[in-house]
Image (tube, helix red, strand yellow):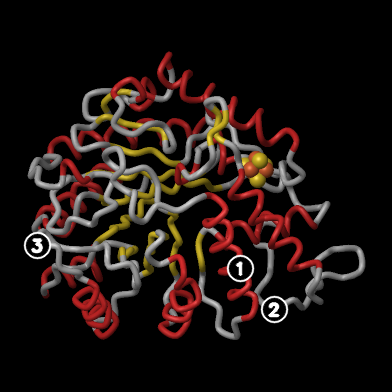
Amino acid sequence: MARETSRQVQFVIKISKFCNLRCTYCYEFAELGQRERMSREQLRSMYVHMRDFYVRKDQEDGVRTHLHIVWHGGEPLMIEPDYYWRSLEDQREIFGDSLEVSNFVQTNLTVLDDERIRLLRDGFDHVGVSVDLFSGLRVNIAGRDQQKNVVANMERLRSEGVSFGCITVLTRKNLGRVKDTFSFYEKAGIGFRVLPLFDGAYENQHEAYDITVPEIVSALNEMVDLWLESDTPVQVSPLDSHFQIVLRHLNPEAPRVYFNQREWISVLVVNTPGDVYAYGDPYEDPAASLGNIFTTPLEELLSGPRFDASATAAETRMAANCLNCKYFGACSGAPIASNRDNVHTVVEGIAVCDVERSVLEHIEDRLRSSDVLDHDGRVRAAAGPLVDPVS
Ligand code: SF4
């Protein structure tokens, strides 16, 4: 495998659970009234632990780490912008030039004023807006749908020169509107991520709008077809990375990639009290926490028995799925190792890679039946937007 010169790690920071909405599917539902937030000093200790760990690791490995800090909640913009400006100042002081750092924020975009627009434009590097378009499930405390307000605020962001992407949660309520969803983003020229509904905060929370694995696969496959047919395709995640996997699979000279959590863990979640979880581990189960990043060096969190148990669980999922998968190597195994988005079928306690594998098959079938591939099954040189950036 070619030696990397840069790599990414993402920390999803649950800055506070407090939120002005009560989206019916929210997995934080029980905690949305809690106003506790991380303090400036706690964030400073977290930055110091991140810096100490990654700078040393970069020196050992001869690789540069790009640190992604994702401000998440609750609703992060319920907190006054000054709080973030001070923390961004702390980042500059603590990280200096030692690491490349980008700040992302995931917002419901219902609260927007001049100060928040300035923060989104000049403080953060990337803005993600949560909007479902056709579900009616994103409601305020009084149960009123906030869609109109959000779309108006998206317009305002555009007119103020703030670029953003969107996340749309796929539920039974918008399952029949895949085409309309795609068209909305295509016309607006906005990239988006499709996030299938996953476990809620309590039993039966999703009863009225839950979706099955075959329904998720069918919606994602429909999205693939729409993307392939589009004259002005926008970025659709995770399909963009699925296309890359299939293109690597079709190119025997493309480098092979293998996920190994013990070598590099690329997504970690930090809960409001500072407890850290590997992405895909049962979030907020104290037994799954790797420890507290406010008080403990990252070196210790990413070693020891809890980390070992998390890595072993990831390896077990990969062994059960990837070793007999034709995409293994083109796909690193990360989707099932990190139990991505928690929407897989579980058989005898082990998640089955039934979503990704089916969508990869569909993409491969579509490419094979189009004129994008030559007679050897390899991508033609002039195949438009389907260029594998890895090969
Ligand atoms: S089983 Fe899933 S995660 Fe593993 S290589 Fe295949 S598609 Fe990737």
Report the Cα–Cα distance between label 2 and label 3.
Answer: 48 Å
Beta carbon at label 1 within 8 Å of ligand 1: no
Q: Position of residue 18 (x, y in %)?
A: 13, 49
State how many labels appear.
Answer: 3
Give the quadrant of the C terminus: bottom right
Q: Is residue 231 left or right of residue 269?
A: right
Mark 2 or 3: in front is 3
> Which amino acid type corresponds to the residue marked 2 in the rendered image?
Gly
N-terminal of the pair, mark 2 or mark 1, is: 1
| Secondary element at tag 2 | loop
| Residue, disc 2 | 384
Q: Dot 3: within a 10 Å radius of its alpha carbon, few (fewer than 14), some, or many (20 or more) residues?
A: few
Q: Position of residue 235 (x, y in %)?
A: 51, 70
The quarter of the image that holds ligand 1 is: top right
Please name whichever residue, 81 or 319, is drawn nearer the observer in this view of the structure: 319
Q: Position of residue 292 (x, y in %)?
A: 26, 26
Image point (25%, 35%), residue name:
46
Q: Which mark is residue 119?
A: none
Q: Are marks 3 and 1 in contact (CB under 8 Å)?
A: no
Give the quadrant of the N terminus: top right
| Residue, disc 3 | 142
Image point (23%, 73%), residue name:
150
Image point (28%, 46%), residue name:
205
Q: Is residue 1 above or below residue 287?
A: below
Q: Dot 2: within a 10 Å radius of its alpha carbon, few (fewer than 14), some, or many (20 or more) residues?
A: few
> Which amino acid type corresponds to the residue marked 1 in the rendered image?
Val
Quadrant of residue 105 within the rendered picture? bottom left
